[in-house]
Image: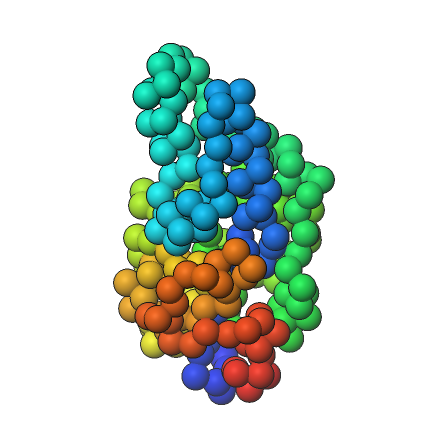
């Protein structure tokens, strides 16, 4: 992984959900589909602010609400695996690439070490990569299966720096959510936020730049 570049950055780490692929709405739909028979629902506002913004678990909050309604622990224990299975099924037919991503990855490919750094499970990651064919652009990928702590914890980004074999100062993180930006900054990285339609209401004040579109990235990097 010793690809030289005359630019400031030598490695770029990409979040996946919401930045590269349109999956965040699918995830919420899968969650609420599983919760609906229990009379429960995760609101869009809670999902944006607490899950996408802070990394709080949809299923954990739903489990607490289910217990208050007297739902059995056996049923509660099945919520997460059922949601994960349903999400995987929905990804196979609904996942799409964010507008501009293909062009941006093509422009950057070969000029930088490029990695995906995602809190998604590896099985979901694999489905997304199979459906979108984006895997070929990247030198490595780190998923939830590669860490004990997920974003906003910096563990995944610290591992990405190690994987890239570059110094932190030469690594750039791209994120669409506040929790992702928090993780990248906690790892000591420069981070550009690229909010999507769901996350643009979040606080990105700690990001080094806030971009209107992922299409802005090559221009900023002089590519």
Q: Position of residue 117 (x, y in %)?
A: 45, 56
Residue 136: image x %, image y %?
Answer: 64, 58
- Residue at 30% across / 53% down in the picture? 153
Instruction: Give the quadrant of the C terminus.
Output: bottom right
The answer to whether one can see residue 72 in this image is: yes
- Most foreground residue, 80 or 115: 80
Residue reaching furthest right?
93
- Please name whichever residue, 54 or 162, is drawn nearer the observer in this view of the structure: 54
Q: Nearer the viewer, residue 56 or 1?
A: 56
- Asked if residue 10 lies left or right of residue 108, the reply is left
Colouring used for the render: rainbow
* Quarter of the figure with residue 138: bottom right
Among the 4 quarters of the image, the one containing residue 157: bottom left
The one of 134 and 136 positioned closer to us in this rendering: 134
Q: Quadrant of residue 190?
A: bottom left
Considering only vertical position in the picture, is 85 above or below 12? above
**Which percent across, then down, holds residue 132?**
68, 52
Q: Is residue 94 above or below residue 64?
A: below
Give the residue drawn at x 48%, y 85%.
Answer: 7
Residue 164 rendering spot, x and y as whole percentages: 42, 65
Count of picture labels: 0
Q: Residue sitting at 57 percent across and 70 percent down?
A: 214
Question: For the point 61% across and 74% down, which residue is it?
Answer: 215
Taking 109 as reference, is 140 left or right? left
Q: Inspect this view and state whether residue 156 appears.
A: no
């Amino acid at each position: 992984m010793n690809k030289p570049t005359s630019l400031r950055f030598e490695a770029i780490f990409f979040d996946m959900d919401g930045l590269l692929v349109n999956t965040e709405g699918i995830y919420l739909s899968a969650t609420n589909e599983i919760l609906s028979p229990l009379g429960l629902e995760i609101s869009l506002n809670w999902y944006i602010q607490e899950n996408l913004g802070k990394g709080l678990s949809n299923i954990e909050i739903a489990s607490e609400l289910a217990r208050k309604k007297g739902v059995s622990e056996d049923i509660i224990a099945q919520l997460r695996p059922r949601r994960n299975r349903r999400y995987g099924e929905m990804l196979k037919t609904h996942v799409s690439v964010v507008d501009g991503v293909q062009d941006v990855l093509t422009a950057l490919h070969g000029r930088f070490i490029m990695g995906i750094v995602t809190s998604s499970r590896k099985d979901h990651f694999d489905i997304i990569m199979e459906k979108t064919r984006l895997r070929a652009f990247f030198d490595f990928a780190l998923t939830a299966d590669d860490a004990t702590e997920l974003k906003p914890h910096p563990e995944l980004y610290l591992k990405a720096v190690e994987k890239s074999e570059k110094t932190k100062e030469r690594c750039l993180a791209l994120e669409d959510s506040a929790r992702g930006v928090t993780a990248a900054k906690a790892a000591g990285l420069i981070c550009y936020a690229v909010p999507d339609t769901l996350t643009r209401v979040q606080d990105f004040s700690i990001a080094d730049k806030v971009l209107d579109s992922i299409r802005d990235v090559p221009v900023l990097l002089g590519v």
